[in-house]
Amino acid sequence: MKYLIYTLLCLIPFVPAAGAQLELVTDSFFPADLEFPELRQTSEVVFEDPARLAKLDYGRLWGDVGFEKYAQRVYEVSKTGTLSIEIVSLKDYRAAYSLLTLLRDSNLRDGPPGDAYTAAADGIRFAKRRDWIRMRASGVPEDLLKRVAGSVSNRLGPEKQEIPSLISHLPRPGYDASSLRYFPGLESFENFAGSKAGAFLKFQSDVEIAQARYSLGTRSGVLSLLNFPTPQVAEDCYADLTANGARYASAAGGAIYTKRVGPIVAALEGSFDPAAANTILDPIQFRYSVRWIYEKSSSPATIWGVPAGILGTVVRSLFFVVLLCGVSIVAGAAFAFFRFALRGRSSDNILDRQSEITRLRLR
């Protein structure tokens, strides 16, 4: 029996280590080597140098939205197909969502996989956290493609991101959701829109842009929402568009209507008449919300050269010492008064009896 106990005690140090081996510890968001037996890795590319983006499709656009890291793995699928998984890490979710709206061949859908995704004949693209994932497949079963996409999405984490708030300001009348395009800055807008960027490029500011196509009856056009850092910058943009509206309209090949609400400027280009333009622009609203945030000072306050925290502790300590002394004095006085009153009423009480002294005089 004692040998069995000794053996169990020797195995105790190895129990945590054995449990730790069950945890998934990885620095890669790609599927594990044995997770999908159908996949056999054939190549891998990883880099963080933005200069290497020039050799990739839409690499310049990735750099404009905020590129940080690129990773790609190519797999052979049962000797009949290929699967390429590209993970582009960007500066934030706005950049990842922008690529999802710009580099797609189908409508956006709510995830999983990712927070939002698009699915087409050639594969799946989705945005998760600050990453944009492009999976391009050839000869790969649809079920396997979805399972691999779910695996990559789960490895990126459970946190769900909200879409950029500017998109919620796009009005509903005549809205074509399949045409949505989102730009986190002017650089990506200029790169993607080219010469069509037109009037907006003169406002070199931290501005985000959302665009979508609108149709009312036989009339159609494009609505651009520009969100500026402050209402003052938005007012400058609105004033310029108003003053030069005729010139911009002729360059765009139609009329241009503008509206400003807070830091947002709306520019509607197309063949709309004033009534149709008002139907589209009128629902655009903006409301401010105020939230009080109380922050502690980074440097502690001092009183007479002593930190307020330490001084407060000393003062509280002295207060409790004085309070304890007062309680002790009151308790002692009450006990003395009780003894005095008890002795006055009966000298033969139990408390005094215990303290009697008997003297014996021996002769």
Image (cartoon, rainbow, N blue to C red):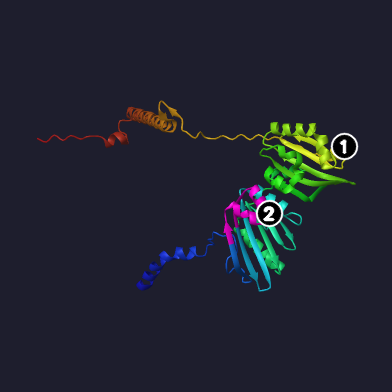
Q: How many numbered marks does the figure carry? A: 2
Q: Nearer the viewer, mark 1 or mark 2?
A: 2
Instruction: Let me know if residue 211 appears in the view.
Output: yes
Element marked by disc 1? helix
In space, the residues marked 1 and 2 are separated at their CA atoms by 38 Å
Please state the extent of the stretch shown in magenta in the rendering: 45-70
Q: Where residue 246 appears, x then y in whole percent?
A: 83, 35
Q: Where residue 89 appears, x then y in whole percent?
A: 61, 53
The residue wearing badge 2 is: 58
Q: What residue type is labelled 2?
A: Tyr
**Residue at x 38%, y 71% (from the top left corner):** 7
Instruction: Give yes or no for residue 54 being in the magenta stretch.
Output: yes
- Give left or right: position of 294 versus 227: left
Question: Can you say whether 129 is above or below 223 in the image?
Answer: below
- Where, quadrant-wise, is the C terminus in this rendering? top left
Element marked by disc 2? loop
Q: Where residue 148 appears, x then y in whole percent?
A: 65, 64
Taking the view exactly as shown, the residue that stands out farthest to the left is 363
Question: Can you say whether 169 is above or below 84 in the image?
Answer: above
Q: What residue type is labelled 1?
A: Pro
| Label 1 crowd (10 A; few <14 / some 14-19 / many >=20) | few
The residue wearing badge 1 is: 274
Q: Where residue 218 appears, x then y in whole percent?
A: 90, 47
Q: Quadrant of residue 35?
A: bottom right
**Residue at x 60%, y 68% (from the top left corner):** 41
Instruction: Give yes or no for residue 56 being in the magenta stretch.
Output: yes
